[in-house]
Amino acid sequence: MKLLFCYQCRDMVELQHEMRKCRCGHAFGKYLRNGLNAVYGGSARIIGIANQDIQDALNDGSHSTLRCWMMIDKNAPHIQWVKSIELAEVVENFVDKE
Ligand SMILES: [Zn+2]
């Protein structure tokens, strides 16, 4: 799971296939069609949460530790930062650096 974190308003929103923005509107992003890569921009960084940890926590039914990480580099494996929301709307593929 990827979360869009805005370092201006500190809002976090889950990325979806449709474009989403933070509360202040300075960060935006969405998943691409393949459901793995994401494009985003503005005053944002991406936070990843291990999907298996979420499932394990739901199965356990108790407090659990989740592994998560902030992608400090704007362009990391599976994510690409773009200058404007207009560019983000038209990106449907990019060369992954993985
Ligand atoms: Zn914001």
Image (cartoon, rainbow, N blue to C red):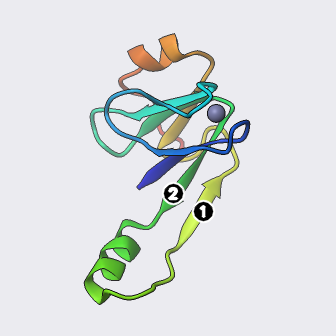
Q: Secondary structure at mark 2?
A: strand
- Residue at 70 percent across and 49 percent down: it is 72
The one nearer the camera, 77 or 22, is 22
- Numbered badge on residue 45: none
* Image quarter where ligand 1 lies: top right
Is 36 on the left-hand or right-hand side of 87?
A: left
Image coordinates of residue 10 in percent, x first then y, are 67, 45
Image coordinates of residue 83 in percent, x first then y, are 63, 18
The one nearer the camera, 6 or 53, is 6
Query: Looking at numbered disc 2 in the image, what kind of residue is underneath it?
Result: Gly
Image coordinates of residue 43 in percent, x first then y, are 69, 32
- Residue at 41 percent across and 56 percent down: it is 1
Callout 2 crowding tier (Cα within 10 Å): few <14, some 14–19, many ≥20: some
Image coordinates of residue 57 in percent, x first then y, are 36, 80
Quadrant of the rendered image containing residue 23:
top right
Quadrant of the rendered image containing residue 82:
top right
Q: Earlier in the sequence, mark 2 or mark 1?
A: 2
Q: Secondary structure at mark 1?
A: strand
- Residue at 44 percent across and 37 percent down: it is 38
The one nearer the camera, 9 or 73, is 9
Is 8 on the left-hand or right-hand side of 88?
A: right
Q: Is residue 64 above or below residue 25?
A: below
Is 81 on the left-hand or right-hand side of 65?
A: right
Query: Looking at numbered disc 1 in the image, what kind of residue is underneath it?
Result: Trp
- For disc 1, the marked residue is 69
The one nearer the camera, 38 or 4, is 4
Number of on-image labels = 2
Q: Are marks 2 and 1 in contact (CB under 8 Å)?
A: yes
Callout 1 crowding tier (Cα within 10 Å): few <14, some 14–19, many ≥20: few
- For disc 2, the marked residue is 48
